[in-house]
Image (spheres, rainbow, N blue to C red):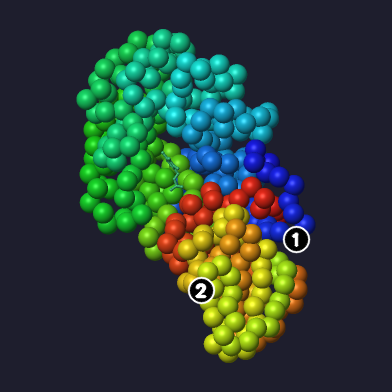
């Protein structure tokens, strides 16, 4: 359970999490990058889907042995969830004075992001395995190219992996991809005989050139395409659903929701569904979003509120009933489509799932 998880409301929203499809997506990456090790990125509570259950499933059923999180606190929780399973756990943030003890207790491996951090690790954890993130064009995090020679010459620094991250992998034709790749290869010459890691989900699916020794798969495991275009080889994992809690007939001229932005043009049936932006469905999903009810699509009517969304179900062939479930994204509405209509990406739809959304594992 995530730290912010509360007892789920009986009639509230839930997310079905298909662990079989999670493993199939892992296999997809494994066959796409067959010469590389596939590591799972489980940061941010496994993209909102629950760190412990996701990591245990990947370890037990997909035989995943390498995991990435950002913070050592996440790494310690992951180590705890994995128990006696064999696993290497990398922390993208690296260590600080305050977190050194966690690295020791939970056997975490830092991803070093600066010369200073590398020096600090060498000083305090002499000879213990580390990895290094090199900056190659994203200008976000990572060691500068000009510091690499110094880092490589630090005594007692045991760099086993060199990594970088692509800024524009969502567009495989973007010229920055190959520029970063070349800079990465040049950077890696400072650290001979190390594991090289460049690709995340997108890189893993972009072909041998971008895979190197280890790929760090995140979003594709969780059912999102890493590209601007959807990739239907990736199976849906998370389905956000909620029940219809009221059905109401309204007359022409009647308004629906905050601001009375929706006015019925004809006699209509409005279904009120027990999920809102507080649960992670974006407020700007109104008026463009549509949902799936019993296999049919229906439009959102009126503004999305924190706890409720109103749907115009007038045109459905089968009139829904109280308690019928409505899918916002998942197997009927692919998350990529839901993200595009709400001007989001699948990453933030998943990580934005609210604390009161019951995580149900299938
Ligand atoms: C989040 C992250 C990943 C995973 O990216 P996806 O696009 O979700 O596969 C890999 N590497 C780094 C450095 C990351 O921050």
Residue wearing tag 1 = 11
| Along the line of sight, the residue nearer the viewer: 185 or 74 | 74
Disc with the residue nearer the chain's start (1 vs 2): 1
Residue wearing tag 2 = 261
Where is the C terminus found, in terms of image quarters? bottom right
On the image, the x and y values in percent for residue 67 come to: 53, 36
Secondary structure at badge 2 equals: loop
Decide: is 111 above or below 201. above
The reply, left or right, for residue 103 in relation to residue 163 is right
The verdict on label 1 being within 8 Å of ligand 1 is no
Q: Count residues near mark 1 (Cα–Cα under 10 Å), then give few for <14, some for 14-19, many for 20+.
A: some
Decide: is 332 above or below 315. above
Secondary structure at badge 1 equals: loop
* Image region (quadrant) for ligand 1: top left
Decide: is 30 above or below 145. below
On the image, the x and y values in percent for residue 271 come to: 66, 75
**Figure disc tally:** 2
Q: Quadrant of residue 156?
A: top left
Q: Residue at x 63, y 44 (%)?
A: 50
Q: Residue at x 64, y 59 (%)?
A: 307
Q: Quadrant of residue 269?
A: bottom right
| Along the line of sight, the residue nearer the viewer: 218 or 58 | 218
- From the image, state whether disc 1 or disc 2 is nearer to you: 2
On the image, the x and y values in percent for residue 177 come to: 28, 48
The reply, left or right, for residue 323 in relation to residue 260 is right
Calculate the distance from the C-alpha at mark 1 to the C-alpha at mark 2: 27 Å
Q: Residue at x 24, y 28 (%)?
A: 145
Q: Residue at x 47, y 15 (%)?
A: 97
Decide: is 213 above or below 248. above
């Amino acid at each position: 359970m995530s730290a912010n998880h509360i007892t789920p409301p009986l009639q509230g929203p839930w997310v079905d999490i298909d662990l079989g499809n999670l493993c199939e997506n892992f296999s997809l990456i494994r066959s796409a990058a067959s010469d590389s090790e596939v590591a799972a990125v489980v940061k941010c509570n496994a993209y909102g889907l629950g760190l412990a259950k996701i990591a245990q499933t990947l370890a037990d059923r997909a035989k995943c042995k390498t995991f990435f999180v950002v913070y050592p606190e996440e790494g310690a929780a992951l180590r705890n969830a994995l128990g006696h399973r064999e696993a290497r756990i990398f922390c993208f943030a690296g260590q600080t004075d305050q977190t050194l003890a966690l690295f020791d207790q939970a056997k975490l491996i830092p991803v070093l992001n600066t010369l200073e951090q590398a020096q600090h690790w060498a000083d305090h954890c002499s000879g213990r395995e580390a990895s290094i993130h090199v900056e190659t064009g994203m200008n976000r995090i990572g060691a500068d190219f000009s510091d690499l020679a110094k880092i490589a010459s630090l005594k007692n620094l045991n760099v086993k992996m060199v990594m970088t991250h692509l800024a524009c992998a969502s567009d495989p034709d973007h010229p920055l991809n190959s520029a970063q790749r070349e800079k990465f290869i040049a950077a890696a010459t400072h650290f001979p005989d190390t594991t090289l890691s460049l690709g995340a989900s997108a890189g893993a699916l972009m072909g041998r050139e971008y895979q190197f020794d280890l790929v760090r798969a995140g979003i594709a495991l969780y059912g999102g395409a890493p590209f601007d275009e959807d990739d239907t080889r990736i199976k849906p994992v998370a389905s956000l659903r909620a029940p219809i809690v009221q059905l109401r007939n309204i007359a022409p001229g009647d308004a629906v929701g905050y601001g009375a932005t929706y006015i019925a043009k004809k006699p209509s049936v409005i279904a009120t569904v027990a999920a809102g932006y507080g649960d992670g469905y974006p407020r700007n999903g109104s008026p463009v979003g549509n949902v799936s009810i019993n296999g049919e699509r229906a439009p959102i009517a009126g503004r999305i509120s924190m706890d409720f969304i109103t749907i115009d179900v007038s045109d459905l062939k089968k009139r829904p009933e109280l308690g019928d479930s409505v899918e916002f994204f998942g197997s009927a509405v692919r998350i990529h489509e839901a993200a595009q209509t709400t001007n989001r990406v699948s990453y933030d739809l998943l990580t934005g799932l609210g604390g009161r959304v019951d995580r149900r594992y299938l």
